[in-house]
Image (cartoon, rainbow, N blue to C red):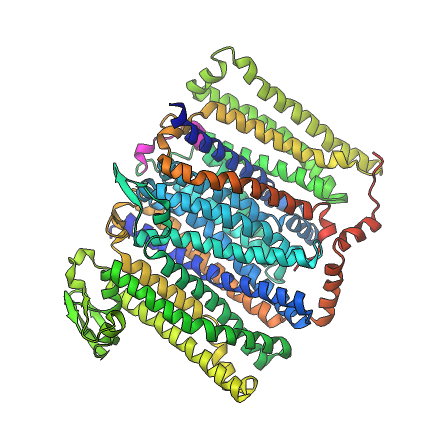
Amino acid sequence: MELQLGLPLFYFLLLGFAILMYVLLDGFDLGIGILYPWFNSDAEHDHLMRSISHVWDGNETWLVFGGVILFGAFPAAYASIASLLYLPIMLMLIGLIFRGVAFEYRFKSNTSRQWWNRAFAIGSSLAAFCQGLMLGVLVQGVDSDTIALSSLQWLTPFSLFTGLAVMAGYALLACTYLTMKSRGDIQQKAARYGQRLLLFVMLSMLLVSLWTLWLQPDIRQRWFGGAHTLALMLLPLLALLAARLLFRDLGRVQRQFAADSDINRRHESRPFWLAASLFLLAFVGLVVGLFPYLLPRQLSFYAAAAPDASLSFMLPGVLIFVPLILAYTLWGYHIFRGKVEDFEEGY
Amino acid sequence: MELDAALLSRLQFAFTVSFHIIFPSITIGLATLIAIWEGLWLKTRKPVYLQLAKFWIKPFAITFGMGVVSGIVLSYEFGTNFSEFSRITGTVLGPLMAYEVLTAFFLEAGFLGIMLFGWQRVGPKLHFFATVVVAVGTWISAFWIIAANSWMHTPAGYVIVDGVFHVKSWWEVIFNPSMPYRFSHMLLAAFITGTFVVLATSAWQLLHTEHKAMARKGLSMTLWLALILTPLQAYVGDLHGLNVKEHQPVKLAAMEGIWPEREAGAPLLLFAIPDKAAEKNHFEIAIPKLASLILTHDPDGELMGLKAVPADERPNVAVVFFSFRVMVGIGMLMILVALTGAFLRWRGTLYQSRWFLTACSYLAPGGVIAVLAGWYVVEVGRQPWLVQGLVRTMEVVSPLPAERVLFSLTLFVLTYSLLFGVYLYFMRKLIRKGPPSPEQLQQQLIGVKAAGYAAALAKQIKPVQEHH
């Protein structure tokens, strides 16, 4: 039994890892697009685009990776989730298309620049919103037997709210990324917006948690049904701690600027990691509630798992290439380290 | 009229995959050419090579971007529109695509940033390395996706358990009978497509711009390449055809327009109008016995025809028949151009022959059109099967409401039409703008020679505080 579960469990964790990587990396990336309308000048927009133009493609590849791991390791889950979430997925893809091509065309355009600004902002926001919506649907659960009939099952107040919450979360990540990668006004703006967004994100997390506990007796039972509740309480406590540190760092960046002193590098870069750890904690909390389901209360990861032949064939690929990918991705970020102004050259 | 969700899903997949294939078939060849130019520049230090690399990197970037965004769609469309297909074949195709992402997509994406934006962040050798990695990444990607696609044509190495495909031998799955042929044919097609985009542009530049040195070099190199690649492609295509005859005889019958159950001494049809209802062709223009000669190496050899299988197991003959002729026709034209170019070069009048350069410049989309036509032969020719002989396309479509698919299809048609226009506009704009001037190149060279130059400059402007 244990051996049989071993491989599916590995891929379940790998899928979680891929989703988390995607959410963190494309999170700040899409977040830049969400924040875009709050920056006004052409120079600011240039800066925002340049801060991610060398990484957006790699960040989005994690979405494809998550998709194909689901396809290859849990074909039954891929089949039902994808057709169930048909419209949100299609809208997300359209959003990703527009914001993706905006990177290439905006810098090469003169007259149409305004349109590419819009494509970037609206496309990013739409993609983020759809992702949040899908998250909400997966948490609240849907009836997979009624794909053809359940035309609007994915559209509920809860899923609409999670859509907005994820948008705010991505925007927060982007604020902390910009705080790390910018100087002067842009950095200040990012730190200021970051503080406000943080408050909204924390409130949303609280609300979504309570809403989920109220809607889902199973999840309530999981959290409060035994001695492990104490251990699980660490998650919200750590999240509160991270949020407090994050709020303080963003405040310091503003105060140091106002006092005309140089901004402490740690205070500039730590917010990003704190925001990322907030995401991590929220994600772990989510998995605690949903495990072992891919489709809540209907399809567990071991029921959806592909036969051993498929799972073990992918194993060497995953074990060799995922560490390699992480290494050269990290190296890529290292090459473009420092502030955006320092690597302004194009190609 | 009752809307048919299955038909709409198929239309949507055909439309989105057709749109997507345009871009990788250009970038595979273009990435390889850019890597070659950059390598030649490093070796010889002749500015013309750097100019070529720097000029083509921009069209490459927008083409690559289009390929990325339209490719993400496909990785989800299997599940959204063909859920039953995903459930029963995900066990085979999923792992192949996982390997594509692991060994190619991340690689391309990871090094693309350095290739495009890293000129002044890394040394010239490391930059060249990044360009080579991106090029190799495109080949690896083609390998996996062609392996997956070929398996759907000539499935092997599997057993079916409870309606789901289980893999017995991954070696047989990957190197299935049609894979080596399809992979070589497609990779060559992509190289030729990139080659002709550059060839046509160089010819145009030679005629209409002042960038003569670069244009000559570009034209000369791509004509040599075309001279090698296009005849080779004809040969590989012939081998691929023989493979189709062996494994998918119905598709071959549709390509050749052969109706009788068996036909000895089948003619090669230059033109005909296949009639599916009457089960024969009209207005045939034929070369007697040639099809049999090519495919069986015997003028009286027997070929299987469409009537050998029931009507519901035949593809749309007209689409396959005409697409095949479009592909072969463009291929022949390309061979002709390559040979004419070689002849003019031998005569020493290549760069002065305006008529030839003009003809070349019209061939820019030739490769793309041939690739699309070729894919229609392959994919429409396999119908009504999705996995040849095993899975019927109509039986594995998601049970979605038709309006929903109509909605997404409409969105894709609008979005892609718009973006295709935009793509052509910017390609034209970039090509008209021409390469960076020698002064600009010189300026960029300073950055390349001194890695970290920009970073150092920035540090001078604002000293970094270390004392915190």
Pick the residue in front: A114 or B18. B18
Q: Quadrant of the C terminus of chain B?
A: top right
For image coordinates 59% across by 78% down, the residue present is B216
For image coordinates 62% across by 61% down, the residue present is A108
In this view, the residue farthest toward the top is A227
Pick the residue in front: B119 or A140. B119
Query: Residue A212 in the image: x percent, y percent?
Result: 47, 23
Q: How many marks?
A: 0
Query: Residue A92 in the image: x percent, y percent?
Result: 47, 44
Query: Residue B342 in the image: x percent, y percent?
Result: 49, 82
In the image, taking residue B458 as reference, residue A180 lies left or right, namely: left
For the question of whether residue B423 can be seen, the reply is yes
Pick the residue in front: A127 or B89. B89
Chain part drawn in magenta: A136-147
**Residue B255 against residue A246 in the figure, above or below:** below
How would you classify the magenta stretch by its main secondary structure? helix
**Residue A80 against residue B332 in the figure, above or below:** above
- On whether residue A145 falls in the magenta region, the answer is yes
For the question of whether residue A196 can be seen, the reply is no
In the image, taking residue A95 as reference, residue A249 lies left or right, namely: right
- On whether residue A223 falls in the magenta region, the answer is no
Query: Residue A285 in the image: x percent, y percent?
Result: 53, 24
For image coordinates 66% across by 40% down, the residue present is A177
In the rendered image, which quarter is residue A140 located in?
top left
